[in-house]
Amino acid sequence: MPRLRLALAQVDTVVGDLAANVARARAAVAEAAAAGADLVALPEMCVTGYPVEDLALRPSFVAASRQAVADLARVVAEDGHGDVVVVVGYLDQDVDAAGRDVQRTGLPSLASQNCAAVLHGGEVVARYAKNHLPNSGVFDEQRIFAPGTHGQRVVVRGVDVAVLVCEDLWRDGGVTAQLAEAEHDPGLVLVVNASPYEQGKHRVRYDLCRSRAAETGCTVAYVNLVGGQDELVFDGQSLVVAPDGEVLARAPQFVEHVLVVDLDLPAGATDEGPGRLYDRVVVHADAGPEPQGRLRPVPVEPVEECEEVYRALVLGLRDYARKNGFTDVVLGLSGGIDSALVATLAVDALGAEHVHTVAMPTRYSSEHSLSDAAELAHRQGTRHRVVPVQPMVDAFVDGLGLAGLAEENVQARVRGVVLMGISNSEGQLVLAPGNKSELATGYSTVYGDAVGGFAPIKDVVKTLVWRLARWRNADALSRGEQAPIPESSIDKAPSAELRPGQVDSDSLPDYELLDAVVDGYVVGDLGHADLVARGASEELVDRVVRMVDRAEWKRRQYPPGTKVSAKAFGRDRRLPVTNRWVEPAARD
Ligand SMILES: Nc1ncnc2c1ncn2[C@@H]1O[C@H](COP(=O)(O)OP(=O)(O)OC[C@H]2O[C@@H]([n+]3cccc(C(=O)O)c3)[C@H](O)[C@@H]2O)[C@@H](O)[C@H]1O
Ligand SMILES: Nc1ncnc2c1ncn2[C@@H]1O[C@H](COP(=O)(O)OP(=O)(O)OP(=O)(O)O)[C@@H](O)[C@H]1O
Ligand SMILES: NC(=O)CC[C@H](N)C(=O)O
C-alpha cells in the first residue's frame, strides 16, 4: 500500500491581494516540503481570497488570477520543490467548456469558474472547475460562476487522488456519488474549501466527511481557509477522515497551520487521459520510496462552545481591522455589558494600546457608568478618555427645541459624532457595539450608537453576550489572571440611560424570552404557530415578530460584523425593506 505524505495548508489570504496570497502559499509549500510532503493542498480560491463576489465578473481579475497560479507553480519549482504536487484554489475561466451553457441572465458572457489547479515541475498540469455552486445563505456562486462538469484525478506516488472544491462534497447525488460509481476508485478524495464558520459547524463538517468517506470508500482530506473576510470568518480546522469514520488528523481552529500526515492508501489506476466523467493526470505512477518515520499528529480536539465563538469574534475583528488598514479601534464605553465585551474582544484582537475607549456621560448617566468604564479600562490597559457630552447635547436640545424621544436619541447621536470626530482626527476604526437582540428589535439609535465601521457582536444575541463575558472572565481566572470585565458590568440590569431610570425591560421583553423567539423567527424562519409551539406566548410572538419586521430598514444601515450563527443579519437573510407581509398568527 503506497504511503503518501499529505500536507493540508490552512492559510489566511486577503481578497484581491494576489501577490501576497501567492507569497503566503509559497511559504506554506516550502514548510510542507521541508516536512517531506508529497502532496500539498491549499484552500479554495487561495490565490484570489474568498469570496470574490463580483470581482469574478472582471476579465482583468480573472486574467491576474490565472497568471498568479502560473507564477506560484514557477516559484515553487525555483524554490526546489518542483517535485511536490500542489493543489490550490484559484479563479479561472472556460476551464470546463460545458460550463458555458449555464444560464446567467443579465451577466457578461465571461464564464468565470471556481477552480483548483494542480501544480508540478513548475507548471500547471491540470485544472478542475467546481461542479456544484452553492447559492443559499451567504453564498451567491451561481450568480458569478459557471459550473464545471468534469472531474479531475491526479496520480501522486501511485495513489489516484480525486480533486474536489468545497460544495462538491456537500451535494447528495453529485460528484461524490459519481466517484462511488466510477470504474476506478480513487485512493483519496482531496477537497479544497472555503467554508465559513458558524456555531457547531465542525460537527456538521465531520459528519459530512464521514458520510462521504463511507459513500466513496475513500479517505477524505479536507483543507479549509482561515481568517476573516468582511462578515465571514473561516476557521481552518482542516481534517482527514478514514472510510470507517476515524479522524486521522485535525488542525487547530482559527489559526494558520500546515498539517502534515502520512496516509497509507490503496494504489490506483495510472492510465492517463480523459475518462467518461473525469480526466486523470499522472505525476508519479509508482509509490516510490516510503517517507521516513510515520507522521501522525494527534488530532486537535474542538474547543467548547463559548471559547469557539469568542475566538471567531476575535479573528473576525482582527482581520477586518488589519485587512482594511487599521491598527487601532475606538468605541464608546458605557459601563454596560455590550461595549465591555466589544472592548475586551478588541484588546484580545489588537492589543490594549490599540484600543481607544471613550466615556461620554450625559445628565442621565449613572455613577457606575463612569466607574465601570474606568475600571475596565484600568484592568485591560485601554487608552481611555472621558468626553462629557452634555454641553453638545444641550446645544441640539435647546437649538432645536427637542424633547422626549428626540432628546433621548440626540444623546446617542452626539456620541456617534464624537466617535467619528475622534476617528477622523486620529485614524481609528469605529466599532458599533450593538448585539443581535438589539438589531432584531431595532433597539438602537440610527446614526447614534449604530455608527461605526464594524460591528463585532452584531450576530451575538444578548444572552450569549453575557455567557461570553462570563466565559472570558472565568478563562482568565483559570489562568491565574485578573478577570478583564468588571463583574458589575455583567450583573447590572441593561439600560440605555437616555432618560431617568430607563431600563431595557421598559421597551423589550425579558432577554431569555426575546432571544428564543429571535432564534426561531430569524434563524429558523419559523411561523407564528411554530414559535408558539416552542413555548412563547401569542402576545410575545406578536410583539417580537412586529419589532423584527419593522426594523429591517435599520439593519440595512448597520455596519458589517462577524457571522457566528446559522443565519446572521446581512447577506445571510435578505428581506425587502418595503414590505407589508405580516406573519399570520396561529389564531387567524
Ligand atoms: N422604514 C423606514 N425607512 C427609513 N427611515 C425610517 C423608517 N422608519 C423610521 N425611519 C426613520 O428613523 C427614525 C427613527 O429611528 P431612530 O431615530 O433610531 O429612533 P427610534 O427607533 O424611534 O428610537 C430608538 C430606540 O432605541 C433605543 N436605544 C437607543 C440607543 C441605544 C439603545 C441601547 O440600549 O443600545 C437603545 C431607544 O431607547 C429607543 O427606544 C425616524 O424618525 C425616521 O427618520
Ligand atoms: N455614557 C456613555 N459613554 C460612552 N459610550 C456610551 C455611553 N452610553 C452609551 N454609550 C455607547 O452607546 C452604546 C449603546 O449603549 P447603551 O448604554 O445605550 O445600551 P446597551 O445596549 O445596554 O450597551 P452597553 O451594554 O454597552 O451599555 C454603548 O455600547 C456605548 O458604546
Ligand atoms: N465555499 C463553499 O462551497 C462552501 C459551501 C459549503 N456548503 C459550506 O458551507 O461550507
Image (tube, rainbow, N blue to C red):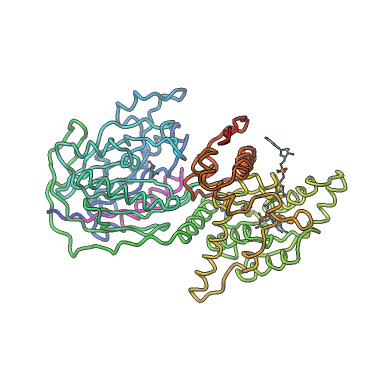
Outermost front residue = 587
Between 144 and 464, the one lying in front of the other is 464
Q: Quadrant of ligand 3?
A: top left
Q: Is residue 371 left or right of residue 119?
A: right
Residue 358 coordinates in the image, percent (x, y): 69, 60
Compare residues 580 and 165 and report the one nearer the observer: 580
Question: Where does residue 397 sit, x and y in percent of width and height?
Answer: 84, 48
Q: Does the magenta stretch include residue 44?
A: no
Q: How many numbered markers are drawn?
A: 0
Image coordinates of residue 59 in percent, x first then y, are: 43, 31
Specify the quadrant that holds the N terminus.
bottom left
Residue at horizontal 37%, vertical 38%?
A: 91
Magenta highlight range: 5-31
Q: In this view, does 249 lie above or below 401?
A: below
Q: In this view, does 544 lie above or below 203?
A: above
Where 287 falls versus 388 (above or below)?
Answer: above
23 magenta-colored: yes
Q: Which of 432 and 109 is in front in this view?
A: 432
The quadrant the C terminus occupies is top right
Residue 357 image offset from top left, x and y in percent: 66, 61
Residue under the point 73% across and 53% down: 415
Q: Which residue lies furthest to the bottom in this view?
A: 480
Q: Please say whether residue 511 is visible from this viewpoint.
A: yes
- Is residue 230 shown to the viewer in this render? no
Occupied quadrant, residue 400? top right
